[in-house]
Image: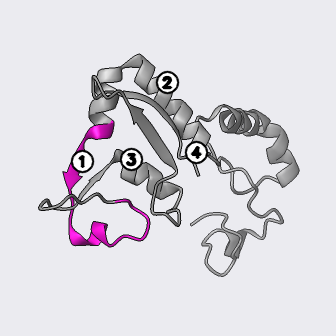
């Protein structure tokens, strides 16, 4: 173990007596001051910040964001989108009893869950037991027309 800042557990620091302790830089944890590391590895810190800014991960997402993505998907491939959203798979009792995953159960059929049940579960359950996201279906073709927030 090297440069962990805990002299009692570090084999090297017991003997070295070096005044610098671990820096914030994961590339060089010992024998360099924080200021030196900031200069020497500035390119790594800048790269890390760029990655954070360019990341596709979102910290927050709204019902409108999900509807927008689903509508974009629907325009790109309506057959696939309709099939994926319409598909429901039989699930066990643990899933059925989950407090927010929305499970569908029709008369004389086992309980089933689909992508909409999971997506709606992410936003919680309304008092009327409806999900936050709904979709419109063309009655003639039985295909999904659009996704939107569920009206009050």
Q: Which mark is residue 63?
A: 4
Q: Residue at x 43, y 37 (%)?
A: 135
**Of 104 and 17, the residue lying toward us:** 104
Q: Residue at x 49, y 45 (%)?
A: 133
**Callout 4: helix, strand or loop?**
helix
Q: Residue furthest bottom?
A: 8
Per the model, the C-alpha gap separating discs 2 and 1 is 22 Å
**Callout 1: helix, strand or loop?**
strand
Q: Residue furthest front?
A: 139
Q: Which residue is mark 3?
A: 116
Per the model, the C-alpha gap separating discs 2 and 4 is 14 Å
**Residue 119 is at least partly visible in this image:** yes
Q: How many C-alpha atoms fall within 10 Å of the one at disc 1: few (<14), some, or many (≥20)?
A: some
Q: How many C-alpha atoms fall within 10 Å of the one at disc 3: few (<14), some, or many (≥20)?
A: many
The N terminus sits in image quarter: bottom right
| In contact (CB < 8 Å): disc 2 and disc 4 | no
Lower position in the chain sequence, tag 1 or tag 3: 1
Per the model, the C-alpha gap separating discs 1 and 3 is 9 Å
Is 114 on the left-hand or right-hand side of 107?
right
Q: Which mark is residue 88?
A: 1
Per the model, the C-alpha gap separating discs 3 and 4 is 12 Å
Lower position in the chain sequence, tag 2 or tag 4: 4
Q: Residue furthest top?
A: 76
**Of 49 and 13, the residue lying toward us:** 49
**Callout 3: helix, strand or loop?**
helix
Q: Which residue is mark 2?
A: 72
Q: Residue at x 35, y 22 (%)?
A: 78
| In contact (CB < 8 Å): disc 4 and disc 1 | no
Is 32 on the left-hand or right-hand side of 83?
right
Is 74 on the left-hand or right-hand side of 151?
left
**Of 121 and 126, the residue lying toward us:** 126
Residue 27 percent location from the top left of the image:
65, 46
């Amino acid at each position: 173990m090297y440069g962990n800042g805990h002299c009692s557990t570090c084999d090297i620091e017991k003997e070295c007596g070096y005044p610098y302790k671990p820096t914030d830089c994961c590339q060089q944890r010992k024998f360099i001051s924080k200021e030196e590391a900031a200069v020497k590895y500035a390119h790594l810190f800048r790269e890390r910040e760029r990655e954070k800014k360019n990341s596709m991960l979102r910290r927050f997402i709204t019902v409108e964001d999900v509807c927008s993505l689903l509508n974009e998907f629907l325009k790109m491939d309506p057959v696939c989108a309709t099939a994926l959203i319409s598909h429901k798979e039989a699930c066990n009792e643990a899933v059925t009893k989950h407090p927010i995953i929305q499970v569908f159960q029709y008369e004389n059929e086992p309980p089933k869950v689909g992508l909409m049940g999971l997506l709606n579960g992410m936003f919680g359950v309304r008092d009327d037991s409806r999900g936050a996201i709904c979709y419109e279906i063309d009655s003639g073709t039985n295909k999904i027309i659009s996704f939107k927030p569920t009206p009050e």
